[in-house]
């Protein structure tokens, strides 16, 4: 019996070791021969207050403005074609949109590499990159700095939530299935101080239990924050993409909810 157990353990260790090697190989190959680069998707470069350089994608509506602004934060893959397409769609709705590079120069199509980005990029650096993007957007000609909101997806949803806790000027915060929804009202900081909060989640999201979503909603209610939270049935994580929001279903409904949320919060007097 002991020999059988030993054999099984050795086999499992061998499989685990092989998987580690495969994952490491995928990451190494993607690092040496990247399938995409951040600069493939950016069209502006700016310098923050400490002299660090940032790349981002800027989309503008027609007209001189001043227009409301939206800071857009990508999923855990990094700044890519999907977030750029979403920025363009929002710009056609009348917003100046800045899609920031929260990682500071990293993007991928590979899940293992994206996980590495999330686990090795400090929250402090991510927050500085996001805050720099907000400041750049607020200072742009043709942007009304009093009417700037933020929207983020997956990793980006979490970052919008965190931005909301520290930026009292944020006029709207749209959180799409951001992991780790805050449960303690005291941790919400200044969230909702200058505008409403929208939460979009999937009922079947294995990484964000419905109980956590409900706890987030209760925490905001306890602080008197103007918020709306929708849990879409029949869908899991990351269900809203630029290529499915024109197709009837949960993604289209969630995108429409975003537009209906942003308009009264940011277009004040224009609708």
Image (cartoon, rainbow, N blue to C red):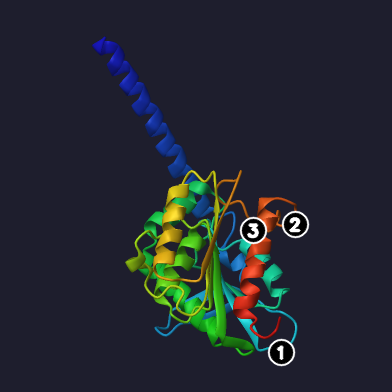
Secondary structure of residue under mark 3? helix
**Chain-order first, disc 2 or disc 1:** 1
Q: Nearer the viewer, residue 168 or 32?
A: 168
Q: Nearer the viewer, residue 64 or 55?
A: 64
For the point 64% across and 83% down, the residue is 268
Quadrant in which the N terminus appears: top left
In the image as oriented, which residue stretches furthest toward the top?
1
Q: Nearer the viewer, residue 208 or 5?
A: 208
Indicate the position of residue 266 as horizontal and vertical percent values. 61, 79
In the depicted structure, whether residue 258 falls above or below residue 7: below
Please give the residue where the numbered disc 2 appears in the rendered image: 246
- Measure the C-alpha gap from mark 1 to mark 3: 29 Å
Q: Nearer the viewer, residue 192 or 22?
A: 192
In the depicted structure, whether residue 265 falls above or below residue 1: below
Indicate the position of residue 62 as horizontal and vertical percent values. 75, 82
In this rendering, position of residue 62 left or right of residue 218? right
Please give the residue where the numbered disc 1 appears in the rendered image: 64
Quadrant in which the C terminus appears: bottom right
Please give the residue where the numbered disc 3 appears in the rendered image: 254
Indicate the position of residue 37 as horizontal and vertical percent values. 57, 62
- Residue 103's tag is none
Secondary structure of residue under mark 1? loop
**Discs 1, 3 touching: Cβ within 8 Å:** no
Indicate the position of residue 70 as horizontal and vertical percent values. 59, 75
For the point 41% across and 55% down, the residue is 215
Badge 1, how many Cα within 10 Å: few under 14, some, many 20+? few
**Discs 2, 1 touching: Cβ within 8 Å:** no
């Amino acid at each position: 019996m002991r020999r059988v157990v030993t054999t099984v353990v050795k086999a499992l260790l061998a499989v685990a070791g092989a998987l580690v090697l495969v994952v490491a190989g995928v990451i190494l190959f993607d690092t040496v021969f990247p399938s995409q680069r951040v600069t493939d998707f950016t069209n502006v470069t700016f310098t923050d207050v400490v002299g660090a350089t940032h790349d981002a994608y800027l989309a503008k509506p027609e007209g001189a403005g001043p227009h409301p602004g939206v800071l857009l934060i990508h999923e855990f893959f990094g700044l890519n074609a999907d977030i750029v397409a979403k920025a363009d769609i929002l710009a056609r709705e009348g917003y100046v949109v800045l899609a920031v590079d929260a990682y500071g120069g990293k993007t991928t199509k590979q899940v293992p590499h994206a996980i590495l980005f999330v686990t090795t990029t400090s929250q402090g650096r991510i927050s500085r990159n996001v805050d720099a993007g907000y400041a750049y957007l607020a200072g742009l000609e043709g942007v009304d700095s009093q009417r700037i909101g933020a929207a983020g997806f997956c990793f980006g949803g979490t970052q919008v939530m965190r931005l909301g806790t520290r930026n009292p000027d944020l006029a709207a915060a749209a959180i799409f299935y951001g992991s780790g929804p805050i449960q303690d009202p005291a941790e919400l900081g200044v969230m909702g101080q200058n505008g409403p909060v929208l939460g979009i989640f999937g009922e079947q999201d294995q990484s964000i239990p419905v109980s956590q979503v409900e706890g987030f909603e209760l925490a905001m209610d306890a602080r008197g924050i103007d918020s709306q939270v929708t849990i879409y049935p029949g869908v899991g994580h990351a269900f809203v993409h630029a290529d499915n929001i024109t197709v009837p279903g949960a993604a289209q409904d969630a995108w429409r909810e975003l537009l209906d949320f942003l308009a009264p919060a940011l277009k004040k007097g224009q609708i």
